[in-house]
Amino acid sequence: MPDNTLFSSIFTQTLEQAIDAVVVIDANNVVMLFNRAAEQLWDIPREQVIGENVKVLVPDEIKASHDGYVNRNRETGENKIVGSSRDIEIVRKDGSIRWGSFSISKVEVGDQVLYTAFVKDVTAAVAERERTQMLSLVTDRSDNAIFITDNQWNIIYINSGFTQLLGYTEGEVYGKTPISVIAPYFSLEDVNSMRANLASGSAVHSDQRVVTKGGEEFWCSVMANPVFDEAGTLTNIVAILSEITATKLHEILHAQVIHAIASDRSLEVVMDIASRELKAFSKEVLPCIFSLAEDDHLQVLSALDFPPEFKRLSNQLQLCGEYSALKKAVHFNRDVQNTGFLQGLKPLFVSMGIRACWTSPVVGDHGESIGLIAFFKRESTGLTAIEKTLGSILESLCSLAINRENQRQQIRQLAYYDTLTDLPNRSLLFAEAESALREAKSHGQSLAVLYLDVDQFKQFNDSHGHSSGDFLLKELASRLNKLCINGDFCGRLSADEFVIIAKNKSTPELGNFVDEIRQSVAKKIHMPALTVVPSVSVGISVYPDDGHDISTLVHRADVAMNQAKSSAPGHCSYFSHELNQAVMARQKLERALQEAIETNQLNLVYQPQVNIDDGSLYGVEALARWQHPELGFVSPGEFIPLAEESGLIGRLTQWALTTACQQMAQWRANQVAVPVVSINLSPDNFHSRDLCQTILAELSAFNLQPSDILLELTEGVLLDTNPNTMKTLHEIHSHGIGFSLDDFGTGYSSLSYLRQLPIKELKLDKSFVKDLELSKTDQALSHAVIQIGQSLNLKVVAEGVENQAQLAVLREQGYPIAQGYLFARPLAPAELEAWLERSPVNAG
């Protein structure tokens, strides 16, 4: 235990009650006294400290060396610690940090040397000192300009950022008002208003133009805050200036230009607005803005400071050769009168006193050059920082405006022009035609509408592919467009249909014009590995004879074109009212056929096919019949071609397939001995890749086998170049469904094609049977057909047999099967069943 006799009772109590912490150590560095304030500062009770080495109170990193430090002071007598004061970090029991200001006293008692440490808690002061140091560091090192004024508005402090930004030193601004130094243009009213706000305690935040020591102007964001003392008296103003020139110029220019663009102003007007706004910031620059055409010719968009002659001369300039570099990088020419691509404008530059030119390319969305900005100057000095900023901002705005204009043109092109041929599309064509018709009416002139259809284009497209078809259409469109002069114009209506509007042509002139069209179209078109000699069918209607509105004139020209196409490829036809009546009748029949299919007005009849040898039934052919309530009986030779031309053939075939399969299922259920039913299909049916699944679905629905039906084709399938046709034929055949080639000998009859088709039966056309017993030629032809069939191991059916003499010849030539009125007309299902119940067919 410490020798407390060394301390007087009064001295001990005094130290114990001290506000600051007191620690006393003996000659062995053992703690003798640790007062209540020390307990609170270190957060350690005195029982854990008194009697322990004093190093329990110091940070861990100096504990090992602490005794040596104190002892050296004792031994040498050098008072390095006595009488001094310093701040020392105190680590409390809970790990938190406090700071204490240590003052050490040396006390000699007898032969012992004691040390007394008085420790004042300065944690808050240290924190504030560090904060002040940091604030000072921030202020001095900030790039922003900072100044402080007194309550008389005079500058008393500036940081280094102020000098860097504005060029003024401390001595040049101290004692002056900031307004007089950097904003002399401020009005007295504005100054008083700002000072009143600050004096009332309100901060002031605004964007202002400021002037540097060198006279250069730029924009700053100014934040000024008032400082008051405890009595509420204004003592200082602290202001921070942040340079925002690029942002502000961008904001102002953008606001004006974007508003003009949003208001759908023309590109030239938008560029003029941009130039005016730019000149408000830099009066030394004469701006000029160009767009750049695909051939690199300049097109003046804005040249506010230049006479009209400048625009005329500039539009002749082209950025090519050595000057093509201007499209890629910024360039400055100090002697524009004698060098560079603008030398041709020297007289104009001399008269205006222009000596230098700065140019910057305008870059599009995809990195391409779409324009050029030129800043002309009357001095050969380079651009100021603010002028460079203006150029950079203007470049982005010009890019936006020119790109938008280009996009507008592209949208117009897409909206009003055909993407393949670049001719006016239907919308623009009709709009232009309406305008031309109004003009013709007002001047008492004629107007001709020519409707052109490329002959056999579908077959060409299917045979040679869409790329070749597109090539053909583009070439024809180009030829037609070149013929349209003196106000005539051409447009594309659909895939292979074009319309030409011919203005004020007499009948002979119109005839000559049509001849020119046909001759131009008929010139050879050379493609890779292919040469084509195209033709067009032309239909013509004329105002005022054939109609008084464009829709009628186009429709009637279309009617005339179809008439021309039905005559022969390359023909021309003028509209007539008789022709129109025929077309209307055809349209009426088409609507009636559509209704007949939907309302089940059609029916199937079945004509027997007989084995010639024994008279037994070989099969039946399903034939469509139509009895219309108003039109009466409509021949299959009329409504089936109509269905093919109008696109109804798919629905007609579906109806025939379903009806025939349903009837075959009934016969099977009733044990009626019909071996097979033949169903006629059109070549167009085979364009659908769904045909096979459709047929299989019908067979499955009525529980029939593939051998229960036979599909009859015409020779037209041999000429069908649609790539789906052969695929569909072989797919159907792969499921065991047979094919019969109808009307053999009347069409293409190519043996090479015949070998490619998966058929099991040929049908000799009735035209060869009609005079068979009398005509040696017909007998020779029929004999050839049976030999072909036998050589290819095909069944051959002779159609149209009407008498015994014809049958005798066919039997002699070896025909196995016959069909015709000699045996039976086409019969309704009940009639066929009755026919079967009668005696078998007498074959001779």
Image (spheres, rainbow, N blue to C red):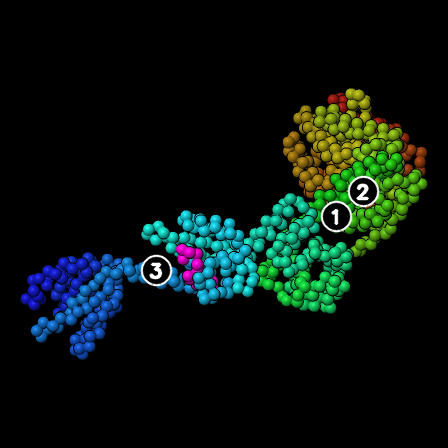
The residue under the point 44% across, 54% down is 224
Q: What span is colored magenta in the figure?
A: 150-164
Question: Where residue 186 sits in the image (x, y, percent)?
Answer: 53, 54
- Tell me, for residue 498, which label it has, or none: 2
How far apart, in angstroms, are the residues tagged by discs 1 and 3? 73 Å
Q: Quadrant of the N terminus?
A: bottom left
Mark earlier in primary sequence (2, 1): 1
Task: Count neighbours of disc 2 (C-alpha within 10 A) and say few if under 14, some if 14 to 19, many if 20 or more.
Answer: many
Q: Quadrant of the C terminus?
A: top right
Q: Secondary structure at mark 2?
A: strand
Q: Which residue is mark 3?
A: 131
Q: Quadrant of residue 610?
A: top right
Question: Where residue 793 sits in the image (x, y, percent)?
Answer: 78, 42
Q: Which residue is mark 1?
A: 420
> Label 1 is placed on what type of residue?
Leu
Circle 2/circle 1 CB separation < 8 Å:
no
Q: Residue placed farthest to the top in the image?
A: 629
Whether residue 77 appears in magenta in the rendering, the answer is: no
Q: Quadrant of residue 782?
A: top right
The residue under the point 41% across, 53% down is 226
